[in-house]
Amino acid sequence: MESIQTIIKTLLKNPTQIKSKSQAKQIHAQILKSFPTFTSTLLSIYSKLNLLPESLILFNTLHSPPILAWKSIIKCYTSNACYLQSLNCFLKMRGSGIYPDHNVFPSVLKSCTHLTYFNFGESVHACVIRVGLEFDVFTGNALLSMYSKLQWYTAPQVFDESPERITHLQNPIVFNQMSKVFESMQDPDVVSYNTLILGYTQSNMYNEAMMMIKEMCNINLKSDAFTLSNLLPIVAEFMDIHKGKEIHGYGVRHGFDQNKFITTGLADMYANCNMVQDSYHLFYSLPQKDIVSWCSIISTCVQNGHFDKGLTLFKQMLTSNIKPNPISFSSIIPACAHLTTLPLGQQLHGYIIRNHYDTNMFISSSLVHMYAKCGNIKLAKQVFNKMENHDLVSWTSMIMGCASHGHVHDSITLFQQMEMENIRPNSVAFLAVLTACSHGGMVDEGLNLFKKMVKDYKIIPDFEHYACLADLLGRAGELEEAFVFIKSMLEIGKKSGLWLPLLAACRVHKNVELAEKISRVIWEFDDNDDDDDGVCVLLSNVYVSVGRYKDAEKVRNMKMKGKEKPGCSWIGIGNKVHSGPFLTETRKMLNNGTGNRTAYRLPESNRLKRLTEYWLHMLQIGSSVLDLSCEFLVMVNIDNLPLVRGDCITTQIFE
DNA sequence: GTAGGGTTAG
């Protein structure tokens, strides 16, 4: 038989003599068979380059792959996110009697982590011990990482002493495992420490994380970029700007200022410490902005009320050819909600559907909220009903959406459904359903829910809940009861905001006597001039409601102390919000229409030209006006009814 | 072998 070298030489001289597929395959097989080590080596090169298809072609030619081939293909599967295939290969390798070595376990453990296969991971751990590799630092680090991430999937949900906050307490068994792994490592390195620190940080165990940092210093392990970026969330949480700046300086000194993880982490930290300008600077300093840095700065904008800027950045992101991902949508949609720019929101929704992101819970919840806020409760419900699962936030968005659209019974039913599905309502969810009761005048229902919140769910009501309840009682005309209720909340009652809904209700029910009583109470503890103005306006409204215009004027001017700002209403047309002067004289003409909302259509031909006329007219009829069905969205509130929570029109008059 | 960003009220 010809030697393989001869075959190759002949082939190189005249490859055209091979005419059939089977001949070609035979030669291919012959070559691979003759150089088995060569195949494995080539495979390992492909694998290192993360070239999965090329690696697979080579791997499939091997009948009994040697350990190097197994290692390479398992690693390649894992780094290409083919975790199941990776584990399959691992099992096959074990089946063929080959013992895994220190190069195999890290990939296998990573696959278990991504698939959240905790039990499988544990058996791999057992395998590690059997082959005596628990002292290997790479394998140990992979084990640490796995246990740290999978503790979330094994830990029961536990409510800590603050019932508002649900935390996943660490599963003691898993933590025990982690400690064991860490202790059995003979020479833990900076990666081991980084992994532990991250595990602690993500479990909100900040003290433990800081302890690890100290320990690192003690054994002279130098912090690296991972350490710093793992620390930043802690600093942000505690708003410890001094520590944050220290880390910033350390990063700059050690050449990490181009590191996107650290820069983005720093930007988040500054934003959390109310230093949004510094966040912007850091973002712009990034030479290579990736999707995460864009999302981060966009959500910083939106969460700080810079909605326009958020939208501008979102557009800039698109023009710099960064493809939006699910997170970018859940960051930007709230901006559309706040600006009530329905067309833009719908455009984004279209993109979301086309990219099959519509199963994402975060996105769906923000869409439900956006549609409800923009006045389209029908679409909000549609999005909600299409969701496969609902979490607390999506339920709450829908409950609040229904409440603000006057679908009171839907709100309450949804709340009950949520409870039946064992979703524990938090204070926001209660606020939503209480708002519904308030809008529907359902006093008993509201009071019962309030009691339930305090007694059954041990939620400490905050100012908003009291305000809502006061509003409920006030709207229902139970003014005296409301007065007593608020007075009983001594400490909390020292905020005029709690009294304002009741004061507004006095206007509806033309109860001058109580209004004066309330105003006196507020002025007694008054330490806030801004609230003061609200009281004057509301009291003056009460006087207007019974025709006592002189008293009204007197009160209005009483506390203004020469700092009267021109009032202003605002009105949205299409995508723009316009503001204009507030007309005091029109206000006097208003004596009813408290909080009643009428859909008002502005014919297209009239547009801006006749806007002022409409505006005046709306003020005159004393309605908060909104148009939900046509392209004009008009927002006017002549009542200055504060705390009409969740109204889909954001009604506000700036006095 | 270790890293970052998101949803609900006002």
Image (cartoon, coloured by chain):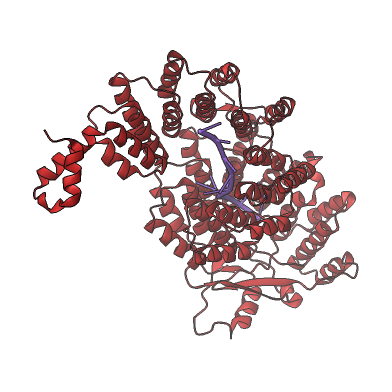
Chain colours: A red, B purple
Asked if A546 appears above or below A93 in the picture, the reply is below
* Left or right placement of residue A619 versus residue A88 in this view: right
- Asked whether A440 or A141 is in front, the reply is A141
Residue A387 visible, this orientation: yes
* Left or right placement of residue A320 versus residue A220 in this view: left
- Residue shown at 76%/43% (left/top)? A486
Task: Return the x and y of residue A402 as percentages of the image width and height.
Answer: 51, 52
- Residue shown at 79%/56% (left/top)? A515
> Which image quarter: residue A30?
top left
> Which image quarter: residue A492?
top right
> Which image quarter: residue A316?
bottom right
* Quadrant where the image shows the C terminus of chain A: bottom right
- Asked whether A110 or A190 is in front, the reply is A190
Asked if A46 appears above or below A624 in the picture, the reply is above
How many discs appear? Answer: 0
- Residue shown at 46%/34% (left/top)? A420
Residue A646 visible, this orientation: no
Task: Return the x and y of residue A190 as percentages of the image width and height.
Answer: 62, 31
* Quadrant where the image shows the N terminus of chain A: top left
- Asked whether A385 or A330 is in front, the reply is A330
- Asked whether A326 or A367 is in front, the reply is A326
Task: Return the x and y of residue A611 as percentages of the image width and height.
Answer: 60, 81
- Residue shown at 49%/73% (left/top)? A631
* Left or right placement of residue A110 versus residue A184 in this view: left
Task: Return the x and y of residue A292 as percentages of the image width and height.
Answer: 55, 51
